[in-house]
């Protein structure tokens, strides 16, 4: 007896433990399900805001939306079965009314079919059948009059709706008053309301769908026009620039056996044209290369690791808005490019911190302290070799077109940029910006760094000789003083180069 009690107690304990375990498992599954549901909702909302998921317009309207109103004729249908109306006439009347109503309802949602003569004739016949049944039997048969008004509102559009809808309501009121006296005014009001409300709802639905279709068409055309513009700009830019490069390459090849200085001059011009072409291509694709700070941090971590530099990235504070994030992404790109190319560092730290008003980005490394921001990545002039601390002002702290361009770009956004040797060695770049940038005013332009000067030389040999030398900013034209049959004028890089 004791063992039996112990067995039952042990079995009850096992069942209780199994129930508790099942309850905990179910609660854990429910918690995971709720978390996944919230995550899916957040991803869906973000995708909708980003435009990756089109707005669902719902199923297109059709005649099926008007069929449930036929249930208003159930009273007349019961009258036929109860013998309150002539079975043959009532049955034929119900068949004719339902057939005409369904025909008109399905044709009302297609513009061409709605405006066809057959639809108007069917609507007139529907009105005659409705008036005949209402005058003949009254009672529940009067409810066919609001249904006739609903069909009228589904078919009619435009300025004729008001006059015809009012006429239909007056006709319904007159027929109802003949059968039920002044109580028929309720039928008149119901007929007028059903006519106008149906017409208003269907007109609004059509307008919304037309606007959505127009918006999709405009978006498609905008994408096509932007693709055409982008391809045209690149074609004009690269086609002209490559033509200049080919011509100057041929000139350098012809001049090399006879005059090496003239050939080197042409090679210098080719380099200038190529640099300017890179700058113009970057300007052409600026709108397509506007990245985020998170993406630049990921790319920076990958580049530092590939270069053998240990990366350290930390973020804190509120996330900046997209424009602030894009500007900080430029700073990360420039600073990390400089570390990889010139610093010989073994460690690079990137820190993003901020308050509700400002955000700060700091890039530090433990390499040589004479580093500057690489000008090549910002479209500036020549690069600066790390470790060159001579009299070249480009290599001095604070010099370089890359650093100047970043400083001016951040200054235009109410930000600051400082760069120089770190307190413990290495080099430090610090950028500060507002968390939310103000919207630019229409017509406002962004300050760009002044282009670096380019020196172009040209030497001609042949029937006559001459030497020309000019120092001009990039984007201007310079030519050799003398030109012969075997020389090509030296042309600096620019957006409007001559052939």
Image (cartoon, rainbow, N blue to C red):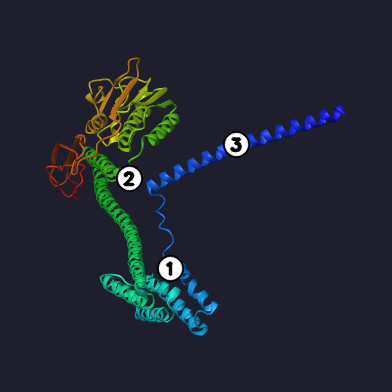
Q: Nearer the viewer, mark 1 or mark 3?
A: 1
C-beta proximity under 8 Å, tags 1 and 3: no
Classify mark 1: helix, strand or loop.
helix
Up the image or down, 243 lies above or below 86; here it is above
Up the image or down, 342 lies above or below 449; here it is above
Residue, disc 3: 27
- Residue at 48% x, 75% y: name it: 76
Q: Residue furthest bottom?
A: 88
Which badge, 1 or 2, is on the more N-terminal residue?
Answer: 1
Which badge, 1 or 3, is on the more N-terminal residue?
Answer: 3
Residue 168 rendering spot, x and y as whole percentages: 32, 75
Residue 357 rendering spot, x and y as whole percentages: 29, 28
Classify mark 2: helix, strand or loop.
helix
Residue, disc 2: 288
C-beta proximity under 8 Å, tags 1 and 2: no
Local packing at callout 3 (Cα closer than 10 Å; few below 14, some 14-19, many 20+) is few
Q: Nearer the viewer, mark 2 or mark 3?
A: 3
In which quadrant of the rendered view does residue 436 lie? top left
Alpha carbon distance from label 1 to label 3: 46 Å
Residue, disc 1: 66
Alpha carbon distance from label 2 to label 3: 47 Å
Classify mark 3: helix, strand or loop.
helix
């Amino acid at each position: 007896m004791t063992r039996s009690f112990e067995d039952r107690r042990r079995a009850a304990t096992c069942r209780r433990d199994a129930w508790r375990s099942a309850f905990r498992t179910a609660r854990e599954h429910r918690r995971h399900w709720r978390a996944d549901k919230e995550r899916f909702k957040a991803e869906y909302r973000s995708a909708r805001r980003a435009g990756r998921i089109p707005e669902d317009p719902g199923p297109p309207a059709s005649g099926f939306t008007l069929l449930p109103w036929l249930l208003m004729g159930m009273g007349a249908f019961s009258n036929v079965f109860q013998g309150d109306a002539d079975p043959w006439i009532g049955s034929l009347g119900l068949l004719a009314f339902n057939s005409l109503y369904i025909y008109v309802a399905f044709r009302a949602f297609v513009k061409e079919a709605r405006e066809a003569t057959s639809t108007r004739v069917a609507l007139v016949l529907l009105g005659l059948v409705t008036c005949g049944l209402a005058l003949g039997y009254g009672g529940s048969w009067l409810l066919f009059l609001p249904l006739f008004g609903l069909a009228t509102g589904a078919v009619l559009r435009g300025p004729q709706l008001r006059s015809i809808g009012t006429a239909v309501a007056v006709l319904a009121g007159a027929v109802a008053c003949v059968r039920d006296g002044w109580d028929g005014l309720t039928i008149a009001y119901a007929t007028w309301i059903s006519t106008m409300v149906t017409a208003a709802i269907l007109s609004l639905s059509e307008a919304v769908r037309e606007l959505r279709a127009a918006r999709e068409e405009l978006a498609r055309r905008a994408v096509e026009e932007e693709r055409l513009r982008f391809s045209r700009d690149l074609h004009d830019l690269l086609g002209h620039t490559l033509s200049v490069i080919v011509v100057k390459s041929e000139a350098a090849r012809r001049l090399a056996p006879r005059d090496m200085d003239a050939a080197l001059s042409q090679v210098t011009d080719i380099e200038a044209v190529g640099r300017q072409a890179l700058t113009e291509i970057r300007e052409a694709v600026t709108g397509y290369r506007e990245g985020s700070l998170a993406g630049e941090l990921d790319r920076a971590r990958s580049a530092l690791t590939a270069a053998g530099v240990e990366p350290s990235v930390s973020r804190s504070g509120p996330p900046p808005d997209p424009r602030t994030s894009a500007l900080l992404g430029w700073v990360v790109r420039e600073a990390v490019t400089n570390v990889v190319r010139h610093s010989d560092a073994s460690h690079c730290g990137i820190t993003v911190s901020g308050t509700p008003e400002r955000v700060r980005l700091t890039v530090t490394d433990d390499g040589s302290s004479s580093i500057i921001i690489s000008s090549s990545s910002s479209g500036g002039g020549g690069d600066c070799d790390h470790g060159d601390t001579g009299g070249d002002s480009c290599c001095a702290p604070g010099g370089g077109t890359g650093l100047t361009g970043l400083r001016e770009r951040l200054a235009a956004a109410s930000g600051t940029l400082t760069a120089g040797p770190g307190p413990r060695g290495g080099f430090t770049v610090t950028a500060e910006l507002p968390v939310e940038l103000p919207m630019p005013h229409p017509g406002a332009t962004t300050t760009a760094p002044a282009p670096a000067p380019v020196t172009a030389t040209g030497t001609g040999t042949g029937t006559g000789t001459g030497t020309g030398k000019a120092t001009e900013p990039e984007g201007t034209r310079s030519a050799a003083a003398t030109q012969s049959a075997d020389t090509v004028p030296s042309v600096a890089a620019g957006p409007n180069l001559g052939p």
